[in-house]
Image (cartoon, helix red, strand yellow):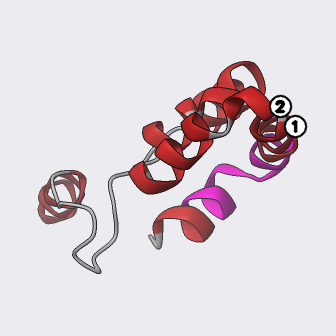
């Protein structure tokens, strides 16, 4: 029961506070990156608002779309545990 409380409190922690962020699904992040990566949707989904805005600013160049495609493939190659550990410090 204590573990469930800890998981719920982890999901409610604000980002940018140096603490782990809420868990996100790697498949959702990967699909967002592949399909909408040029607009930075995957970055917004993962809580990286600054990078999401940067992707939006340069979407017209096509570079964010290419980077998003590569990131999406990378996200999908990780296991769930590896993805959470690398991107959310859990």
Q: Which mark is residue 48?
A: none
Q: Position of residue 33 (x, y in %)?
A: 70, 33
Residue closest to the far bottom: 18
> Which residue bears the numbered disc 2?
62
Q: Position of residue 59 (x, y in %)?
A: 68, 31
Whether residue 12 is in magenta: the answer is no
Q: Position of residue 23 (x, y in %)?
A: 40, 50
Of 70 and 39, nearer the camera is 39
Residue span colored magenta? 73-84
Asked if the residues shown at circle 1 and circle 2 are in contact, with their CB atoms under 8 angstroms apart, the answer is: yes
> Which residue bears the numbered disc 1?
66
Could you give the CA–CA distance between mark 1 and mark 2, rounded to whole angstroms? 7 Å
Q: Residue at x 57, y 39 (%)?
A: 57
Q: Residue at x 78, y 53 (%)?
A: 78
Q: Secondary structure at mark 1?
A: helix
In this rendering, would 85 be left or right of 53? right
Q: Quadrant of residue 37?
A: top right
Q: Position of residue 14 (x, y in %)?
A: 18, 60
**Which secondary structure class fits the magenta region best?**
helix
């Amino acid at each position: 029961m204590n573990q469930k409380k800890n998981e719920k409190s982890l999901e409610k922690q604000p980002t940018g506070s140096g603490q782990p962020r809420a868990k996100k699904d790697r498949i959702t992040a990967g699909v967002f990156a592949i399909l909408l990566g040029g607009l930075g949707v995957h970055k917004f989904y993962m809580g990286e608002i600054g990078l999401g805005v940067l992707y939006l600013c340069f979407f017209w160049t096509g570079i964010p779309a290419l980077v998003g495609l590569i990131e999406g493939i990378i996200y999908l190659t990780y296991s769930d545990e590896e993805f959470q550990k690398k991107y959310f410090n859990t």
